[in-house]
Image: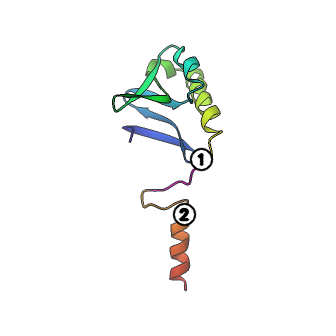
Amino acid sequence: MFGGITFMLSGNMLCCVSKQGLMVRVGADAEPVALASPFAQPCMGAGRRMAGFILVSFSGVASSAQLKKWLSMAQAYVGKLPEKQVTDARGDRNGQQRATLKQRSSQ
């Protein structure tokens, strides 16, 4: 969806690494603080600004400390969101369909 590798926390998007940089989900309240940081800019999706998402250029995550800062900011927001059921590529929600199929096949 975002053209890169997306990392999830409890079924919610935490960040995405793409050829543009690191996209982090910080939430609308933290967005002004995040945008005041060097190398940060609003994240645009389909020509529209994505509220609560920041795009950080690779220069802004060159050191471990810089990367940790952004991931901590994202985790502080995403960690408070309600957990979502995760669906894998087969449409399997948290292994529920596999368990149901196993039960049916053993009957």
- Labels in figure, total: 2
The x, y position of residue 50, in whole percent, is 45, 30
Q: Crowding near pointer 2: few (<14 within 10 Å), some, many (20+)?
A: few
Q: In this view, does 102 lie above or below 57?
A: below
The three-letter code of the residue at mark 2 reads: Gly
Which segment did they paint magenta? 83-88
Residue 70: mark in rendering: none
Residue placed under numbered mark 1 in the picture: 10
The x, y position of residue 92, in whole percent, is 48, 62
Element type at mark 1: loop
Residue placed under numbered mark 2 in the picture: 95
Q: In which quarter of the image is the C terminus?
A: bottom right
**Residue at left offset 49%, top offset 56%:** 87
Q: Could you give the CA–CA distance between mark 1 and mark 2, rounded to whole angstroms?
A: 15 Å
The three-letter code of the residue at mark 1 reads: Ser
Of the numbered discs 1 and 2, the one sitting upstream in the chain is 1
Is 51 part of what is drawn in magenta?
no
The x, y position of residue 15, in whole percent, is 51, 35
